[in-house]
Amino acid sequence: MRFNGKINISVSINNCSDNSIIKGNNNNNRSYIGYNSNNMDGRPLVIFCLGPPGSGKGTQCSRIVGEYSFIHLSAGDCLREALANKDETSELIDSYIREGLIVPVEITVGLLKKKMQLYGWNNGRFLIDGFPRSRDNLDGWFRIMPESEVNVLGCLFLNCSDEIVVERLLHRGETSGRVDDNKETIVKRLRVYHEETTPIIEHFKNVNKCFSVDASSSIEAVWEEIKQVFSRINM
């Protein structure tokens, strides 16, 4: 089965959310006056959350949801939920995964858009975790959801060194039971992250929409930095 450009998406609203001093850009001391976090024009507001595996995206996203009333969406969760639906879309996704191919961005963004509509499109506030991971993801997003329809405020970047990431994930693997928490797989995931996702973070830096936080510190220290970021963008 191959993607023909048309998607019939049916997803439930229950499982696709994980609700569980700005650094970088040479703008450490300025207020982000240019960022408009007020959705008075009806467009949904989106912040992407990116960072290497093990940088604490899930933990910090859960706190942002509780503090700032965002809806937390994960592209991976949306794909897994769609797979469980056992319909035409799930068969298409399964065929790509079984063949080791990347699921077309039209499907992934379509699932995210459907979920945003289900939660409430007009003036909605969405925190999207782990997306966009590649240039194809980014281009596909803006092709399907242009700025005229969605207000992308920017990218929250949880910056963490490879050494700390490896240490964290190996420690997590001792109790998590996750098959991907082993050193060989972690190194591969980091290689893909640097090749595919780092250029996306650089893109947001270049357009002055990257909010960089030092994620190598404790959970509480990282959270304090994130709160400063959200204060500066008038959340």
Image: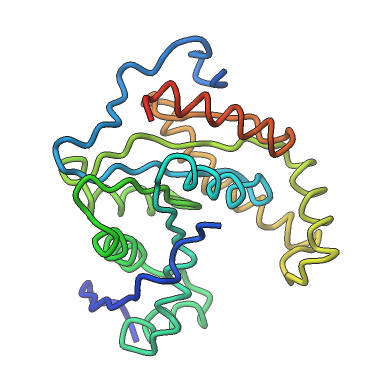
State whether residue 225 is above or below residue 198.
above
Is residue 187 shown left or right of residue 132?
right
Residue name at image x 30 percent, y 52 percent: 141
163 sits left or right of 227 in the view: right
Q: How many numbered dots are placed on residues in this image?
A: 0
Q: Position of residue 60 (x, y in %)?
A: 58, 44
Compare residues 25 and 190 and report the one nearer the observer.
Answer: 25
Residue extending furthest toward the top? 29
Quarter assignment of residue 86:
bottom left
Residue 180: x and y, percent? Answer: 72, 66
Please give the name of the residue rendered at 43% of the width and 21% of the height, measured from the top-left corner. Answer: 232
Q: Please say if 233 is above or below 2.
A: above
Where residue 178 sits, quadrant-wise, is bottom right
Q: Position of residue 213 (x, y in %)?
A: 59, 30
Which residue is found at the position 17% from the left and 35% from the top? 40
Q: Quadrant location of the N terminus?
A: bottom left
Seen from the viewer's position, the closer of residues 84 and 183 is 84
- Where the C terminus falls, by quadrant? top left
